[in-house]
Image (tube, rainbow, N blue to C red):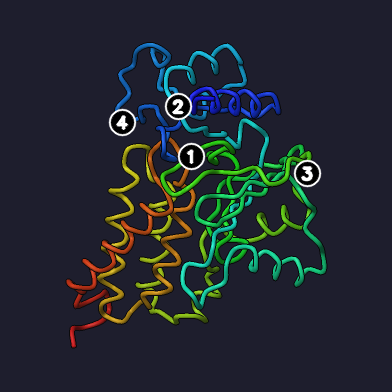
Amino acid sequence: MTSTQNLTDWALYLAAQGWRVFPLVPGTQRPAMHGHDRCPGTGACQDGHQGWEQRATTDPDRIGRCWQERPFNIGIATGPSGLVVLDLDPAKTPDSPDGTAGLAALAEARGVELPATYTVSTPRGGTHLYFRCPPGVRLRNTASTLAPSVDTRAGGGYVVGPGSLRPDGGYELTDDRESPDLPAWLVQALTERPTQPLSERAESAAINPDAYAAAALAGECDRVRRAPPGRHNAVLSHAAYALGQLAGTGLLPEGTTRAALTTAAGTLIGADCDCTPREVDRVITAGLAAGARNPRRTSPGRSAA
């Protein structure tokens, strides 16, 4: 069986679950569609840009025609599909927790158990847990909001579906049971926290910045969350540089600043662009480093040393 036919079959199978699929560039996790900034305004976009979330489909005829052209990987638009997918990443360093341990610790702290569900393993040792979004609940993407190395994909996001292939391996279905509703305790955990990584009280306790630095941190993170399509990298890079300048003076700890920017940028991942966790980390790292090399020497109300 050719890889093209195999991927076609997987795309049709996923669509039969009621999940809206769209093509990803073969061998990658990038949408095989133009972004908002490159929209020609013709064809499907003649009445306005139609991104992957709008064009994702369950139509078997459209799917068959598309996937027979090339061995596209498969994206599942989580919002239109009524899904919330927990993305459990492997540990980033030998001393850091992985997503599975982080989620287990959260469940233990709340005295609950995570129900078994539809599960897909990823090439780098991660896990995707599929849940239905409960009726009346609106959730968006998050990055390490529930626990370290635990991201979520919901409205505005997508996951790479099983059957998809990358040079380092494939996305493999390990449990095909029906997905239950996202447990109420997880809905609560995702909605009870602010979108920024730390509340103002926690920020004050953790880093005790002056009012100027605290306002700068909150303002830049808010700008990142509201970055318009086509400007995600530019806005994130500018924010990382500006905050890196403050970190370079000691007004903001680099680790807390990085965590704040990473969480704010979690709303961009899986949006109508090519943003990925790796790209977000690269932009933040470069911006913070560049800003730290050119620290802001003064701030309002504070003279230079």
Mark 2–mark 4 Cα distance, whole angstroms, equals 26 Å
For disc 3, the marked residue is: 181
Q: Residues within 10 Å of mark 1 (few under 14, many from 20)?
A: many
Q: Which quadrant: the C terminus?
A: bottom left
Q: Seen in the image, is 5 located left or right of residue 292?
A: right
Residue 234, percent across and down? 28, 48
Against 89, residue 175 (above or below) is above
For disc 1, the marked residue is: 165
Mark earlier in primary sequence (4, 1): 4
Mark 4–mark 1 Cα distance, whole angstroms, equals 28 Å
Mark earlier in primary sequence (2, 4): 4
**In the current view of this chain or complex, which residue is farthest to the bottom?**
305
Pick the front one: 174 or 143: 174
Mark earlier in primary sequence (1, 2): 2
**Secondary structure found at label 1:** strand
Mark 3–mark 2 Cα distance, whole angstroms, equals 32 Å
Q: Which quadrant: the N terminus?
A: top right
Residue 31, percent across and down? 42, 33
Q: Amino acid at mark 3?
A: Asp
**Secondary structure found at label 2:** loop
For disc 2, the marked residue is: 71
| Residue at the (31%, 61%) spot, across then down | 240
Mark 4–mark 3 Cα distance, whole angstroms, equals 36 Å
Q: Residues within 10 Å of mark 2 (few under 14, many from 20)?
A: many
